[in-house]
Image: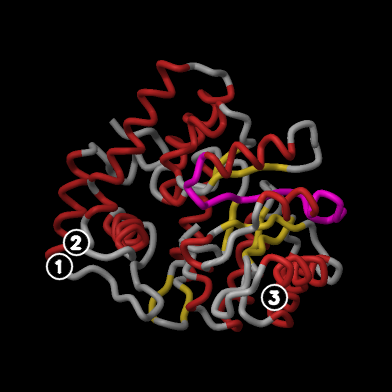
């Protein structure tokens, strides 16, 4: 889920409330806050705590809430996990600490140490493009012996890595394998993933729920149709900006144009200017989207 903001350190509270209901109305099975799409590393701890409290209170147990706790500080990750537990979250999500390039033995020691201090079940979050570190398959195999590590969110976009982890975790009904890049949702679920964490579901939750359900049913024609709609987002709304921030900017801009929430960004990024906003609006019109159809598949 994105983090609706009105400025660099203030939540768009009405927008957050509308966004939560919009996403839940699309039938999603859970919410993941304070991840990459949520701009978590750029947010103050005060704002992160406020977001955790508000989301968990509004969701009120309707679906599980997963909270990202990745930080360069071991202590602050633990603090975020404690706040999530107090608020009623179901689990926390932990990526490798970024900045210092830890070796795999050092990363394993970190995982082993922090897992023992976290009050909630833990999903490891493999995001090497942002952290410059990967939870190698051998480490995942070792992590299966840590009781409160219950899953992996793989955002590597590397299907060979996914298949290796899937083989290692096959038969473990207590371990969930989720895939990050939404373009891989259909084929990953067909190949044994338990689901996906899809940024595009901020705009079109029903599209991704339908794609997940089609993949679970191995309905190949429907998968192909829905996957093509997912790919259209990458070629349209996600392609407006010039930089890697375009994905989040496009999502926030689209939600703003549809009256869901403000599109302010956490710095170092800025919201789209008038020219880019007009492009996003044109793409929304081409996709046949309006505020009444947001929870439905596009096309």
Image x and y of residue 72, in percent = 62, 80
Q: Earlier in the sequence, mark 3 or mark 2?
A: 3
Residue at left offset 51%, top offset 40%: 159
Is 25 on the left-hand or right-hand side of 222?
right
- The part of the image, by quadrant, that contains residue 88 is bottom right
- Circles 1 and 3 in contact, beta carbons < 8 Å: no
**Residue ID for mark 2:** 277
Image x and y of residue 189, in percent = 56, 31
Residue at left offset 39%, top offset 35%: 296
**Residue ID for mark 3:** 77
Q: Give neighbour class at mark 3: few <14, some 14-19, many 20+ (Cα, 10 Å).
A: many
- Circles 1 and 2 in contact, beta carbons < 8 Å: yes
Is 188 on the left-hand or right-hand side of 265?
right
- Circles 3 and 2 in contact, beta carbons < 8 Å: no
Between 20 and 170, the one nearer to me in the picture: 170
Between 5 and 116, the one nearer to me in the picture: 116
Q: Earlier in the sequence, mark 1 or mark 3?
A: 3
Choose mark 3 or mark 2, whichever is in front: 3
Magenta region, residue range: 143-159
What residue occupies the far left of the structure in this picture? 275
Quick check: 97 above or below 123? below
- The part of the image, by quadrant, that contains residue 101 is bottom right
The colour scheme applied to this rendered structure is: secondary structure
Choose mark 1 or mark 3, whichever is in front: 3
Residue at left offset 76%, top offset 43%: 175
**Residue ID for mark 1:** 274
């Amino acid at each position: 889920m994105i983090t609706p903001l009105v400025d660099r350190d203030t939540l768009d509270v009405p927008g957050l409330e509308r966004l939560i209901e919009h996403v839940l109305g699309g039938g999603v099975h859970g919410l993941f806050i304070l991840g990459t799409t949520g701009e978590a590393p750029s947010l103050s701890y005060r704002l992160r705590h406020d977001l955790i409290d508000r989301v968990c209170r509004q969701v009120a147990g309707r679906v599980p809430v997963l909270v990202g706790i990745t930080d360069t500080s071991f202590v602050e990750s633990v603090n975020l996990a404690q706040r999530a537990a107090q608020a009623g979250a179901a689990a926390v999500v932990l990526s490798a600490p970024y900045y210092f390039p830890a070796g795999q033995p050092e990363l394993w020691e970190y995982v082993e140490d922090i897992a023992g201090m976290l009050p909630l079940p833990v999903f490891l979050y493999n995001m090497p493009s942002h952290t410059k570190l990967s939870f190698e398959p051998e480490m995942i195999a070792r992590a299966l012996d840590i009781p409160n590590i219950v899953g992996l969110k793989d955002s590597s976009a590397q299907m060979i890595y996914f298949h290796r982890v899937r083989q290692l975790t096959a038969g473990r009904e207590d371990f969930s394998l989720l895939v990050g890049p939404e373009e891989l949702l259909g084929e990953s679920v067909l190949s044994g993933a338990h689901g996906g964490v899809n940024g595009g579901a901020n705009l079109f939750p029903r599209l991704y729920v339908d794609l997940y359900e089609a993949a679970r049913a191995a309905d190949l024609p429907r998968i192909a149709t829905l996957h093509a709609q997912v790919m259209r987002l990458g070629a349209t709304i996600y392609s407006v900006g010039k930089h890697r921030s375009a994905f989040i900017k496009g999502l926030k801009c689209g939600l703003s144009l549809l009256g869901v929430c403000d599109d302010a960004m956490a710095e170092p990024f800025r919201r789209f200017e008038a020219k880019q906003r007009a492009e996003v609006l044109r793409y929304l019109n081409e996709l046949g989207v309006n505020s009444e159809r947001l929870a439905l598949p596009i096309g």
